[in-house]
Image: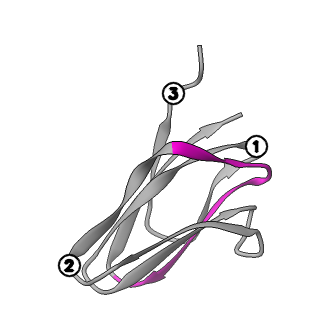
């Protein structure tokens, strides 16, 4: 049986997963315009795998039907203010 898809709330730049796994997408909500960038890596120096932009007082993003396989991990870089996000992932 496969591990379940996990969800992590993010409000600052953070490492969501260290090591190989799968990225299932992200959803971003903000009170001001904001961006979410997801990388295969442990910092923003990794390979960009997803990006989401959101306008003020809106939400954007979704859970992917087909996940993106990551080799190094998942790092989330948030830019803007008044935001929070949810990242879906699975380790291994």
Vertical order, 67 against 41 (above or below): above
Lateral position of residue 32 relative to residue 47, left or right: left
Other-residue count near label 2 (Cα within 10 Å), few / some / many at <14 / 14–19 / ≥20 = few
- Disc number for residue 75: none
- In this rendering, position of residue 82 left or right of residue 48: left
- Residue at 58 percent of width and 24 percent of height: 3
- Residue at screen point 74% across, 68% down: 47
What is the x, y in percent for residue 27? 38, 60
Q: Residue at x 54, y 42 (%)?
A: 66
Tell me if label 1 and label 3 are in contact, CB under 8 Å: no
- Give the total of numbered labels: 3
Q: Residue furthest top?
A: 1
Dot 2 corresponds to which residue?
Answer: 57
**Image quadrant containing the C terminus:** top right
Location of residue 33 by image quarter:
bottom left
- Spot occupied by residue 16 in the image (x, y as percentages of width and height): 60, 53
Q: Residue furthest left?
A: 57
First in residue order: circle 2 vs circle 3 = 3
Above/below status of 4 relative to 12: above
For the residue labelled by badge 2, is the local secondary structure a helix, a strand or a loop? loop
Q: Which residue is mark 3?
A: 4
Start-end of magenta stretch: 66-81
Q: Residue at x 45, y 57 (%)?
A: 26
Mark 1, residue position: 20
Magenta stretch, main secondary structure, is: strand
Circle 1 packing at 10 Å, graded few (<14), some (14-19), many (20+), is some
User: Disc 2 or 1, which lies upstream in sequence?
Assistant: 1
Disc 2 to disc 3, how far (Cα)?
31 Å
Residue 25, image x and y in percent? 48, 53
Q: Is residue 61 left or right of residue 37?
A: left
């Amino acid at each position: 049986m496969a591990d379940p898809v996990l969800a992590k709330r993010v409000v600052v730049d953070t490492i969501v997963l260290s090591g190989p796994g799968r990225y299932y997408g992200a959803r971003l909500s903000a009170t001001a315009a904001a961006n979410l960038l997801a990388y295969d890596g442990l910092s923003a120096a990794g390979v960009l795998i997803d990006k989401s932009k959101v306008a003020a007082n809106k939400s954007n993003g979704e859970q992917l039907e087909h996940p993106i396989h990551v080799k190094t991990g998942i790092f989330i870089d948030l830019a803007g203010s008044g935001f929070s996000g949810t990242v879906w992932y699975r380790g291994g």
